[in-house]
Image (spheres, rainbow, N blue to C red):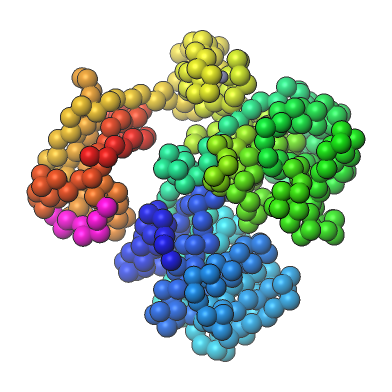
Amino acid sequence: MELRNYQRESVLAVYASWRANKNTPCLVLPTGSGKSVVIAKICEDVLRWDGRIIVVSHVKELLDQLESTLIKIGINSDKIGVYSAGLKRRETDKQITIGGIQSIHKRSTEFLQHGKINVVVVDESHRINPGLEDSMYSNFINDMRASNSNLKIAGLTATPYRLDDGLIYGEGKLFESVCYESETEDLQNEGYLSPLVGKKSRQEINLKKLPKARGDFNSTDMGLRFLDKVEKCVQEIILQTDDRKKVLIFCCNVDHAEKTKAVFERYGKTCGLVSSMHANRDQEIANFKDGKLKFLVNINVLTTGFDDPDIDCIALLRSTMSTSLYVQILGRGLRIHPDKKDCMILDFGDNIKRHGVLSDLNIKKDKEKRKTIAAKACPKCETMCSIAIKICPVCQYHFKAEEVDPNHKDKASDLSPTAKVEKLKIVVEKIFYKKHLSAAGNVSMKVTYVGGDVQINEYVPFESENQWALTNAERWWKYRTGRFDYPRTVDEAIDRIEQNELLKTVDVVTYTVQPNGFPKVVRRKFRNL
Ligand SMILES: [Zn+2]
């Protein structure tokens, strides 16, 4: 199977962790980046090593999708088992098992009677509740570990944080660390993911003092607020999506969804409806995928595991406090398709303002989050932009000084830690590569980018004993040379750079200035040599 660069790198990063006896690494891959391909590759390798692997997920669609990916890459279906009550299959004796967590978490012994398990992959690993020892995932993993102290685990998620608990990795948590992270914006720049264009709706929905339940807005109350404007919202969706092909709509609750659908139909537009309460879910999804339905309304169903590459508009007729839910919803629009230039996000619920644009998310605890806004609407074209941006990327509007960061318009001197830092750029004129010895005695290659009178350094630790640092150095090398034969020493690296092994070089560096005065590189733009 042909893997994309970042997919291959992420698999290699997992194996590097395991080899270094870090048995619980976590991969952070954006929605739409093809996680099932990465999991399938791990399954294929485990099969080659003659081991047994269980992939756990909580979403039925992901289980389906993974099984078909495995078969597509040529794995004999005799080797693949599925354990899921929802899919009415209970196979426990295969080398590869794809299991629904709700179905398998008390079934460890059934799997173990056919031999020990070597690898457990946890998809959507942010679902694990790190505080609860008795959670389904922990129980299952503890059982597997009891029969194999060398059990290897890998987690995959697009959102390595939870509303209630912050990051999902670190001390005392199931996952030790992130072994590889790929960012949405990079994959968009490389053409693997579609750009998203956020639009603020013209309808003002009253969201003031909206009651909450279990960490998010109460869906009944929220539904009533949105129902007040249901007619106007549908009109706006129809108007704004004239040149769009497939519009996926997220509603608050069943009543709100049914009424929204009814308004579409009153305007002569066919509209599908998918919820856990409606029976014809599979048929409606199929009609949408086939292009028989332009509009599809759903309630929290089509968030994970639903893939339809040519969705080119997502309308949020709801609000959420959950950044990971928000990211998952937006993720439905990230897949690329030949007929699609971007995906429009029509936001009726102030979500972009609350959580930020995808490349600049507002990951704060609830209380702090409410105090700041994370994105702003362009006054001219209504595109939602990252908070610090000065020129609208769509219509080139120049934000006025007080519009650049509306969080601080009252107090220009406010230096709160939540203030967004301005991003600066240099066009690189010259690059120097030098051997560098740090005060602590670590050797690395110091790369200096020079543009105008600004110099920015980065350090590439080809000789590091730290696996994560080394993986980063190798990634640095591979991205710029397309080669896997990494230099073992800094001297070798500089030598090979002088012999023109680099195929790509950095053209533009975007950076921020940290409180200590040092620049922090946030993005690089490459050019082929
Ligand atoms: Zn604009």
Decide whether residue 487 is among the magenta residues: yes
- Residue at 57 percent across and 55 percent down: it is 126
Give the image quarter of residue 319: top right
Quadrant for the N terminus, please. Answer: bottom left
Task: Give percent across and percent down for residue 498.
Answer: 10, 44
- Compared across the picture, whether 298 is left or right of 27 comes to right
Q: Can residue 492 be seen at all in this image of the molecule?
A: yes
Q: Is residue 476 left or right of residue 126?
A: left
Q: Which residues are magenta?
A: 482-489
View quadrant of ligand 1? top right
Give the residue displayed 85% in from the left and 56% down from the top.
278
What residue do we see at 43% from left, 48% from top? 182
Q: How many marks?
A: 0
Task: Estimate the x, y position of residue 86 in percent, counting from the top left.
Answer: 74, 70
Is 114 situated above or below 173?
Answer: below
Q: Position of residue 295 (x, y in %)?
A: 76, 42
Q: Is residue 128 left or right of residue 270?
A: left
